[in-house]
Image: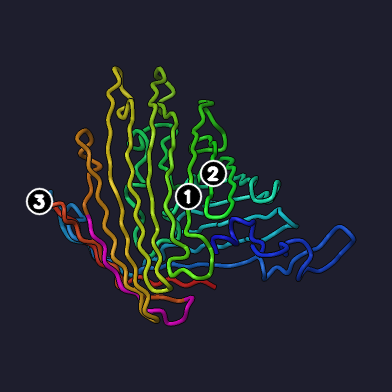
Amino acid sequence: GEKFMRNGFQWPEDEPDGDKTGKAELSEDLFIDKVGNWLGARVSFTPINFKTNDLTVNGSLEDSFNIGNPNWLQLFVGGAIFKNVSIFIEQEFDSDSSKFSWFHLFFTNLADTYVNFQVGKLSPVDFSPFSDRLRIWQTSNILNIKSSGGLGENSVNIRQSRPGIQYYGYRGPLLWYAGIDNGTDASDTDREKNYWGGVRLEVPDTGQSNFEGSSVGFHIYSGIDSTADATTPRVENDFIRYTMAANGRYKENLDLQLTFQIGEDDNWDLATPAVKRDFQGFTITGAYWLYPWYMVLQYDQINSDDISSIEFNKISPSIWFFLRENFKAGIATRFDVSGGANEQHEAALQVRAMF
């Protein structure tokens, strides 16, 4: 699947099939695919959700219990427009909004596999061993920390989609990539850009190793955030993120993923005078597949001597039953192990399907 995506949704072996194969020939220069080959959908809902210390009632914390939450419906369009030019769009609908979650236009194989581009609304860590996409249960908290604590005009983390351009190339076990983005919006109000780059080393694809699909990688992301209040003089925050990641796969049963990040903000509070703050944290996820059961254990930790509000320490076990390979239901939990007086635990019945 990863090879198929990086090759612009064309078969990665032999000659790419994105041009004419399986398409209707309307003219000498126009071949149109069947609509059904382009479309897909994914749905998630939470019939039951329970959280401790989630509500404030009469000045004290109380537990919450909710039922029947339709989380989202995602519609996908993906495939080759013609050879080496392809598109991927994810439109997400939730209870009160609709948005383009992802929007990629691919230009692939411009110089063999050495020169490829993504343009649109994309993620800087799409090619990392830990992209935090299509996760089983919870997102990685360390990859979700935004610059300036989310208070700036262009506050971003490193995993969410944003308008940008990304170059990538690959040969054998090595993949490399670099990109530039506006920040949060396609209309850049402050003209400052963010930059990233990364490398990924994979276990060679020989067809003989039990660890095929395993990889390690390093990623760096740097940018400038600024105050959101246009009525006051602009205050900027130069920030940088260093991220290491690994994905270990054994046969078809065991999958281990790890990401570790160090973050530095020269002016986290967007204040004058500036005060530098930093943090570090990791997410580790292990999953074991014994069809039709899938067992997952995730642990997230964030530490900071400067920013107590982002500290985090939770473990998230879950177990899933696949009624079909495209329909799963599971009991997902998250336990707060920070040791504080108001620890928040969570348990939910989750259902997801793709068709």
- Mark 2: few, some, or many residues within 10 Å (few <14, many ≥20)? many
**Residues drawn in magenta:** 314-326
Which is more foreground, mark 1 or mark 2? 1
Residue at numbered disc 3: 341
Query: Of the residues under marks 1 and 3, which one precedes in the sequence?
Result: 1
Tag 2 secondary structure: strand
- Tell me which residue sits at (49%, 64%) in the image: 73
Left or right of 122 in this view: 219: left
Q: Nearer the viewer, residue 237 or 11?
A: 11
Q: Quadrant of residue 81?
A: bottom right
Query: Of the residues under marks 3 and 2, which one precedes in the sequence?
Result: 2
Query: Of the residues under marks 1 and 2, which one precedes in the sequence?
Result: 2
Q: Nearer the viewer, residue 143 or 97?
A: 143
- Residue 177 is marked as 2
Image coords of residue 234 (percent x, y):
41, 20
Q: Quadrant of residue 307?
A: top left
Say which amino acid is labelled 3: Ala
- Mark 1: few, some, or many residues within 10 Å (few <14, many ≥20)? many
For the residues labelled 1 and 3, the Cα–Cα distance comes to 41 Å
| Count of all numbered marks drawn on residues in the image | 3
